[in-house]
Amino acid sequence: MDLARDILDEQVELSDHSPLGRADGVVAELRTDAPPRLVAIELGAVVLAARIPWVGDRLARLFRHLGAAPPFRIPWNRTRKVELAVVVDVDPAATPGMAVERWLRDHVVDKIPGA
């Protein structure tokens, strides 16, 4: 598997095909006696910013300062398949993306008349 081609920047979906975000990074464990082992997929603006050459660390610090959610890691053993999207088996309520959606529902959508 070519991680840069098959995982990074690909859509991450739940088992029911609802979108969770994009794979912004991968976490690998380096081992001395064996090939590296893929540990997790990371989602989040801080991870994406850190990938940008020369300014990535500064952008990541800025995002953290502005209150961006910390990176969300999905253990690789929760990955079900890698096709057009990376399908994972996680509880969506535990992800930072759903926290944003809940906040929007509670503070914006529910305030709209007829919503």
Image: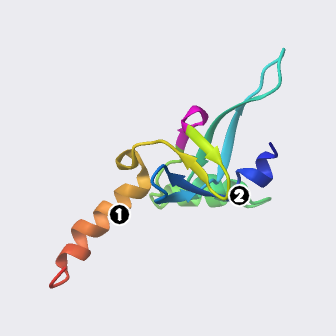
Instruction: Identify the magenta region.
Output: 73-78
Q: Which residue is mark 2?
A: 56
Badge 1 density bin: few <14, some 14–19, many ≥20, Cα 10 Å: few
Residue located 42% across and 52% down the image: 96
Q: Which residue is mark 1?
A: 101
Residue closest to the far bottom: 113
Quarter of the picture containing the C terminus is: bottom left
Q: Nearer the viewer, mark 1 or mark 2?
A: 1
Would you say 43 lies left or right of 105 here?
Answer: right
Q: Secondary structure at mark 1?
A: helix
Residue located 57% across and 60% down the image: 62
Residue 72 in the image, given as x and y percentages of width and height: 51, 46
Would you say 63 lies left or right of 112 here?
Answer: right
Judging depth in this view, the residue of 50 and 43 nearest the camera is 43
Q: Say if 69 sits above or below 26 in the image.
A: below
Would you say 58 lies left or right of 19 here?
Answer: right
Residue 77 in the image, given as x and y percentages of width and height: 58, 32
Residue located 71% across and 33% down the image: 28
* Alpha carbon distance from label 1 to label 2: 27 Å
User: Is 77 inside the magenta-drawn segment?
Assistant: yes
Q: Amino acid at mark 2?
A: Gly
Badge 2 density bin: few <14, some 14–19, many ≥20, Cα 10 Å: some
Residue 47 in the image, given as x and y percentages of width and height: 62, 52
Quarter of the picture containing the N terminus is: top right
